[in-house]
Image (cartoon, helix red, strand yellow):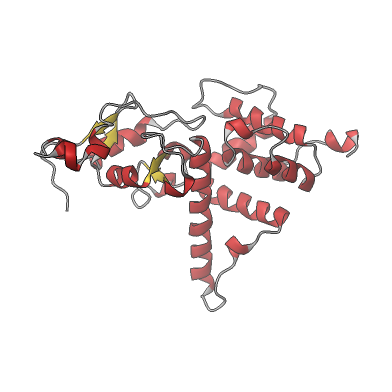
Amino acid sequence: MSKNTARKPWTRPDIIIAINLYCKTPFGKIHVKNPDIINLAKKIGRTPGSVSYKLANFASLDTSLKRKGASHHSRLDQEVWNDFFKNMDVMALKSEWMMSRLTEETSEFEFDKDMTGRTKTSLVKTRVNQHFFRQMILASYNNTCCVTGLSIPELLIASHIAPWSENKKNRLNPRNGLCLNALHDQAFDKGFITISQGFRVILSPQLKRSNDVNKKHDMLTKYDGKMIAFPSRFLPDQTFLEYHRNHIFRKAEQRKK
């Protein structure tokens, strides 16, 4: 690749694709030897160094991070970043489509031809966006449950803090997500555990009242009061955590169907 090609200006489509990869790549894997970065660089006519630097630099635009990346982002970087995260329902799907065109992986966008156009479009959008959200959350938590430390991806869930069905605007907001193992995802979803303002696990009094709590619920009770592991980016938003504590969590006298 020539020096002139390597230094060509970043375009809006290039930045959208780079943000997509940034969201799905753990911080520890943002480097020039990452196969995904090498592949993307080749597809968009850039060097792996250029792409990895761009991904690392996006950290300076993430307001949830205490540590920042290099602050040499452009005005276009800022504009595209803001647009991406303000319109994630649209931009996530668009970026996934753009990535699939580059890699020639179009299976996520193909469904039964007998479906009506409207049904097909809706299912494709839901499926692709849910897959993107999962990749984004697991990458942010380095494929590790934030409560137990379990690191088997097949047993991990990208859990919504404010439920998918109750907060359409923030379905893809990465700050509305936690990486949990399957058991703790269900416990969180059903309100048996929640997360405090100080990011500690809170156990529902309904479990604490059990007469045989140590034997029956030990996989949940032993984490009561434990600080969750923080993600490398997209720290959970306190607004969503407060909603979960007030509307999902099973409090002392609360009864749920």
Q: Nearer the viewer, residue 33 or 109?
A: 33
Q: Nearer the viewer, residue 219 or 241?
A: 219
Residue extending furthest toward the bottom: 114
For the N terminus, the image quarter is top right
Quarter occupied by residue 242: top left
Picture coordinates of residue 100, whole percent (x, y): 66, 55
> What is the count of numbered marks?
0
In the image: residue 86, left or right of residue 243:
right
Quarter occupied by residue 40: top right
Q: Residue at x 25, y 30 (%)?
A: 224
Picture coordinates of residue 59, whole percent (x, y): 59, 28
Q: Residue at x 39, y 41 (%)?
A: 180
Q: Residue at x 70, y 33 (%)?
A: 52
In the image: residue 16, left or right of residue 140:
right
In the image: residue 29, left or right of residue 46:
left
Picture coordinates of residue 17, whole percent (x, y): 67, 45
Residue extending furthest toward the front: 215
Q: Residue at x 51, y 31 (%)?
A: 233
Relative to 160, is 113 above or below?
below
Picture coordinates of residue 245, whole percent (x, y): 26, 35
Quarter occupied by residue 229: top left
In the image: residue 250, left or right of residue 148:
left
